[in-house]
Amino acid sequence: MSFTRREFTKQSAVAGAGIALTGAVGTLATAPGALAAEHDGRGGHDEHGHDDHGHEHGHSKAPGYGPLIADPKGILALPAGFSYRIITHSGVTKLESGETTPSNHDGTAAFEGPRGVTLLVNNHELSGTRDGWARPVPLAEGLVYDPVAAGGCTVVETRQGGHTAEWVGIAGTSTNCAGGATPWGTWLTCEETEDKAGKNGLLKDHGYVFEVDPYDRRANRDPRPVKAFGRYAHEAVVIDPQRGHAYLTEDAATPNGLFYRWVPPQGFKHGRGKLRTLADDAGVLQAFKCFDKSGAFVDDLSRATKIGTVYGVDWVDVPDRDAKTVSVRKQFTDTEVTRARKLEGMWWSDGGVYVVSSFARAESPVQHDGQVWFYDTKRRTLTLKVLLGVNPDPTKDGAFDGPDNITVSPYGGLVIAEDGEGVQHLFGATDSGATYPIARNDLNEGTAEAPVYSEFTGVTFSPDGKTLFANIQTPGIMLAITGPWKRQPKK
């Protein structure tokens, strides 16, 4: 059922501000440019977690876990009481088959395995052909889509005692960026590319979503793209566990990317291996179109400059989802759909989708350094939860910028991986909008005079909520973070 502009305008007039106040996790935001300034978790705390008044941080109502303490090993700064363990390290740890772990770790999901095992599916964002990379994903027999492509996924088995195993889940894909876990316990890996066969040396068309089963290696043989989801620069995907709709983001520019919905064909039931059975044109792929309370069309999400902004959403059918001659996003005029720069990570929770727009610059109507939206599937509304103004100096360890991968925390609010400029963090946002640092990447790949810090990716909690997994994309390190997690205050 389409949610018309008239319905939204009528509802807005009746409910007024009530719509903006209705949210699955509250208003996860601060004023532009002040996300870290509202509470950065550093000032006034000593290394033992006490503030300037001698109070213990653990007894404070302030959010977070106190200041970050520099890592003597130069890898990961954490609050007092927290520690990390390296799970995989590109070029250092090895797969079951003997090759070293591939590089460029990206999107990740954690699944509950037997007898205390956690299974993680880890994307490796490697673009183009294999000869351009020192450590591409190995071409495991029967698991290869395009034999010249460098990317893919590995499956990591880890136990609390420290034992780790790793094997290939899929190979021969390209630019595996984010993705999403399914309600039935598999991973959907997304290719962030539009390269067709013959471009950049590739032998097959790319820009698809593939399913990887962490439990059944045989289920991953003879990889088949889910062409029904479309061919474009995929970033992330989530599945509505009730309706079976898929929601997908596109990380693209010139023009900016789109937010998509796939509606399954009548009678289709999701489950293990069912996506492989879909016809290439199964269901309907749609792009979203937003309008404000007055009924006016919204051309770009960067137009929203206030927390609590609510847009009504309608959906427009995609003419050619496989982009045979024209990129999907270019099949629409700028008055037919709503665009956004750097549509990134997503997470399903609270009956809807959290979706990130990482930043906006000159190609967008309004500049910002990050937004997080919540799409309520029942109300068919999109609400701005987090807004980061342009960071004036990303080289300083202050305000956050460039949100990317995202997860909902079992302790309340969100945990967000930063892919900004300069210093990189994992940071949290409480239900009411207070923010705090969780970790900082201390691994300098540059020089003391010109430091370079890679982005964080793959942020996800273990099924029991005790461990936060995250990656440093380059050189490619998967980390398990543990410590005195606690419920975060709502205010």
Image (tube, rainbow, N blue to C red):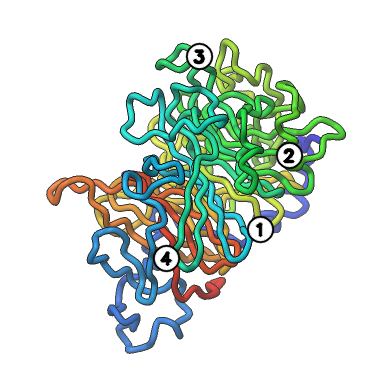
- Residue 441 falls in image quadrant: bottom left
Residue under pointer 4: 436
Looking at the picture, which amino acid does disc 3 mark?
Answer: Ala
Looking at the picture, which amino acid does disc 1 mark?
Answer: Gly
Looking at the picture, which amino acid does disc 4 mark?
Answer: Tyr
Per the image, label 4 sits on a secondary structure element best described as strand
Residue under pointer 3: 197
- The residue sitting at 43% across, 35% down in the picture is 137
- The residue sitting at 69% across, 41% down in the picture is 312
Q: Position of residue 114 (x, y in %)?
A: 63, 61
Residue under pointer 1: 23
Q: For label 4, count other residues whose C-alpha is less than 10 Å away and answer few (under 14), some (14-19) or many (20+).
A: many
Disc number placed over residue 387 in the picture, else none: none
Work out whether 392 lies above or below 251: below
Give the spatial CA distance, label 2 vs label 3: 29 Å
Give the spatial CA distance, label 4 vs label 2: 33 Å
Give the spatial CA distance, label 4 vs label 1: 21 Å
Q: For label 1, count other residues whose C-alpha is less than 10 Å away and answer few (under 14), some (14-19) or many (20+).
A: many
User: Residue furthest toward the right?
Assistant: 267
In primary-sequence order, the first of circles 2 and 3 is 3
